[in-house]
Image (tube, helix red, strand yellow):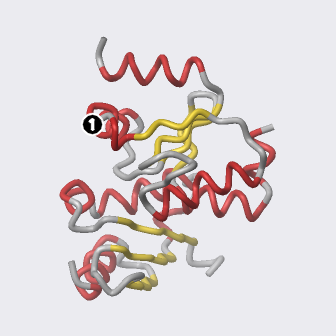
Amino acid sequence: MTPQEVKERLQNAYSDGYVDVTDLTGGEDHYSVYIASNVFQGMSRIQRHKHVMNVFAEELKTGEVHALTIRTDTKENR
Amino acid sequence: MSVKDRIDKILEENKVVLFMKGSPEAPMCGFSARASAILNELNTTFHSVDVLMDQEIREGIKEYGNWPTIPQLYVNKELLGGSDIMMEMFETGELKEVLE
């Protein structure tokens, strides 16, 4: 999965948000993502991470995305 | 015994459980290595489960807590998260409190 595809997928999922994607190894399967969106309002840390990983449920299952490091904020705290 | 019962039993018997790839002494993946290193840094006694040696648990644990990746840390039968949540909580001191 290319960085552009990851970014697009997140932008669609968090249309109000700011999204930043980093390919950690250049192998296009270890990503670090940062998302600032009000979707996370009132969500615990683990709920936020589950929410983001759900966007890549299929790729995480097949291993196309091997690892996803996640950092989230609501838009105010960004 | 279903995989769910097996996991329930492990979590019942151990306060802190790290499901990881490899073992703390020989981690087989960077994120698993980081997770076990954090627990060692906090001198935590924990039970580690090498999912590479147990395919049933490797898939079962993902469904159990609805978390698709390894490593996973459980404390008092509750999923805390993966290595990035552990790192975040370690840096804020929250992890130390939870483990006490």
The total of numbered circles placed on residues is 1
Q: Position of residue A77 (x, y in %)?
A: 65, 77
- Give the residue at x 65% y 27%: B15
Q: Is residue A70 above or below residue A11?
A: above
Which residue is pictured at 26% across the width and 88% down the height? A4
Q: Name the foreground residue: B55 vs A74.
A: B55
Q: Left or right of A20: which side holds A3?
A: left
The residue positioned 64% from the left and 62% from the top of the image is: B87
- Is B61 placed above or below A39 here? above
Q: Residue B8: percent from the left, percent from the top?
A: 46, 20
Answer with the quarter of the image where residue B77 lies.
Answer: top right
Q: Position of residue B75 (x, y in %)?
A: 63, 35
Front-most of residues B76 and B6: B6
Picture coordinates of residue B6, whole percent (x, y)? 39, 19
Of residues B53 and B44, which is closer to you in this image? B53
A48 versus B47 height, above or below: below
**The quarter of the displayed image where residue B59 is located:** top left
Instruction: Name the quarter where the C terminus of chain B is drawn.
Output: top right
Residue in view at x 42 percent, y 37 percent: B65
Mark 1 residue type: Gln
Q: Chain of mark 1?
A: B
Residue furthest toward the top? B1
Look at mark 1 in the image and give the residue it sits on: B55
Label 1: which secondary element: helix
Left or right of A71 in this view: A12? left
Q: Residues within 10 Å of mark 1 (few under 14, many from 20)?
A: few
Residue A69 is left or right of residue A13, and the answer is right
Q: Quadrant of the N terminus of chain B?
A: top left
